[in-house]
Amino acid sequence: MLERLQKIISQAGIASRRESEKIIQQGRVSVNGKVVTELGTKVIPGKDRVAVDGKLISGEKLVYILLYKPKGILTTLKDPQDRKTVASLVTDIPQRIYPVGRLDYNTEGLLLLTNDGALTNALIHPSKKIDKTYIAKVAGRPSQEKIDLLRIGIRLEDGVTAPAIIDEMEFERERNLTSFRITIHEGKNRQIRRMFEAIGSDVKQLKRVKFAFLTLEGLRRGGYRHLLPQEVEALQNINK
């Protein structure tokens, strides 16, 4: 996630935001070895090398959070309509952390949050094809022929989906609901819901249970934990 240069300098404790702007305009700041005087300059925390008067500054501590997002929570930091957001679930984290990708309002499950912009950009890049696994409860019981359409890829308004791995888990006769375990590596908006809509089925409940190798094990709805150092390293290795 890109951040303004003056914010990075201020967070490092060198000067206030306003004083940091003056320092930049005075030509005392360099980014990756090049002097920068433009106040609109943005950098990637943890990746770009920022120096003041020739001395590298250390940015804020990088934080990696695995959150169990409940249904009815927005995947954003602030909402103009004052609806509850994921930021309200991590208020005791001093750093400003951002969601890695999105889960829609009515979807629950695994969501990563971090202030590591370089890692975020890498994890959401389509070329990485990182697996994301969901449990979907669907009205009725779609035929195998229709489910096979999702397995090979189905056309949506924004293109044909990549092949999905789909397994039927359970049919609840009393509630007329079928549970499916679905793994995709794309990140189209509301993709799982739209895939089932395309075959005439309505997703009643949706939960992301896995991102790459990470799961919700040990977490309750609304709870979170810090990633272990080896988990962070493994995510970083995905992008090499």
Image (tube, rainbow, N blue to C red):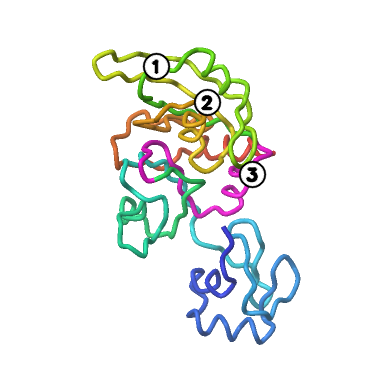
Q: Earlier in the sequence, mark 2 or mark 1?
A: 1
- Residue 49 x/y as whole percent: 66, 63
| Mark 3–mark 1 CB contact (< 8 Å) | no
- Residue 74 x/y as whole percent: 37, 51
Part of the protein shown in magenta: 105-128
Q: Is residue 107 magenta?
A: yes
- Residue 62 x/y as whole percent: 50, 53
Name the quadrant of the C terminus: top right
Which residue type does callout 3 highlight? His
Say whether residue 197 is left or right of residue 67.
right
| Residue for point 49% across, 57% down | 61
Residue closest to the eye, 146 or 235: 146
Q: Which mark is residue 183?
A: 2
Q: Earlier in the sequence, mark 3 or mark 2?
A: 3
Which residue type does callout 1 highlight? Arg
Q: Earlier in the sequence, mark 3 or mark 1?
A: 3
Figure check: 125 above or below 41: above
Circle 3 — which element?
loop
Q: Which mark is residue 125?
A: 3
Which residue type does callout 2 highlight? Thr
Q: Residues within 10 Å of mark 2 (few under 14, many from 20)?
A: many
- The answer to which image quadrant residue 56 occupies is bottom right
Q: Which mark is residue 45?
A: none
Q: CA distance from mark 3 to mark 1?
A: 34 Å
| Residue for point 51% across, 37% down | 191
- Residue 48 x/y as whole percent: 66, 61
Q: Which mark is residue 141?
A: 1
| Residue for point 61% across, 60% down | 44
Q: CA distance from mark 2 to mark 1?
A: 19 Å
Q: Residues within 10 Å of mark 1 (few under 14, many from 20)?
A: some
- The answer to which image quadrant residue 66 occupies is top left
